Each structure stands twice: as C-alpha cells, then as structure tokens.
Amino acid sequence: MGLGPLPELVGYNLRKAQVAVFQSFQNAVAPHDITPGQFGVLIMIHENEGLSQSDLGAAVGIDRSTMVAVIDRLESRGLVVRAPSPNDRRSYALKLSDEGEKLLGDLVPRIKAHDQGMMKDLSPAEQAQLIDLLRKVARAG
C-alpha cells in the first residue's frame, strides 16, 4: 500500500510511535486497568500532594471537564481523595489514598520496565537524544 509522503512526516511517525508505546503500556499494566493519562495524574498527585484539580489539569494539559471526569474515576476506584482546599473553598486539594499509593508502588517498576523495553534498541546516548528531541518538538507546538 502506498503511503505517499506520510513516512517523512513528523506527525505520522509520532502517532505510530504513540500507538506502539500505548499498546505496550496497556499490556504492562493490564491487571490494573490504568490508562497512560491516569498513570500520569497519579504520579503528579503523588509528587504534589494537595494540588488543585485546575492546577493539575494545567500541568498535564487536560481541560477542566476532562480532568473532573478523570479524578471522578480515580476517586470512585478509591485511588484519589478530594478534600476541601485550605486556601480556596471553591477548589479541592488532591491526594492519593493508601490504595492509590499502593497501586503506584506496583505500577512504577512495571512502567519503568515497559519504558526500558521500548527503548531497548537505542543506545543510552540515543535514548537521551530522543527525549531531548521530543521535548523540542513539544515546545515548538
């Protein structure tokens, strides 16, 4: 099948890589039913306990209504706790529940192994270069 100019386009290649990474991610965490986005949210809450939903959404690039749905799902699973913010009665401070901390403790090594597997054909210098180049592309967008 002819692909025309697609193989030379950044977006086409990024999308193919994203699909491969997400499929591998899903296989690595299948027993836990966690998406890459939810994993990122759990990490951000773990690293920034008390963060508001709006600040979290801004940090990970998720709009307000989508962030509410993500937090609702994680809260319904008993992984995240919302508490009234001590600084702003209109917002909630987020933290991981004990179950959320336990799950994250199991997920992080799995995700690190998954990440290493995705990069296994690259030298350490190429891995660092890839990360640097992806950051540059993201900043340009």
Image: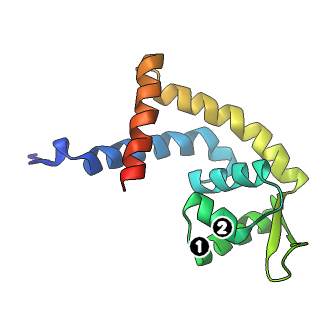
Q: Which residue is mark 2?
A: 70
Measured in 3D between alpha carbons, the distance from the residue under mark 2 to the one under mark 1, in whole angstroms, is 6 Å
Q: Which mark is residue 66?
A: 1
Q: Residue at x 17, y 48 (%)?
A: 6
Would residue 130 be found to the left or right of residue 101 on screen?
A: left
7 versus 65 height, above or below: above
Going by the image, does 25 lie left or right of 15? right
Q: Say whether marks 2 and 1 touch (CB < 8 Å).
A: yes
Q: Residue at x 56, y 66 (%)?
A: 62
Quadrant of image for the C terminus: bottom left
Is residue 3 rendered to the left or right of residue 112? left
At numbered mark 2, what does the secondary structure look like: helix, strand or loop? helix
| Tag count | 2
Q: Quadrant of residue 53?
A: bottom right
Which disc, if any, is residue 6? none
| Amino acid type, mark 1 | Thr
Pick the front one: 55 or 108:
55
Residue 5 screen position, x and y as percent = 11, 47
Residue 133 placement (x, y as % from top left): 39, 36
Q: Position of residue 107 (x, y in %)?
A: 71, 40
Identity of the residue drawn at 47% across and 30% down: 118
Give the SS element for disc 1: helix
Residue 61: where, in percent of width, then height? 54, 62
| Residue 103, above or below 131 | below
**The residue under label 2 is which amino acid type?**
Val
As displayed, is residue 3 above or below residue 130? below
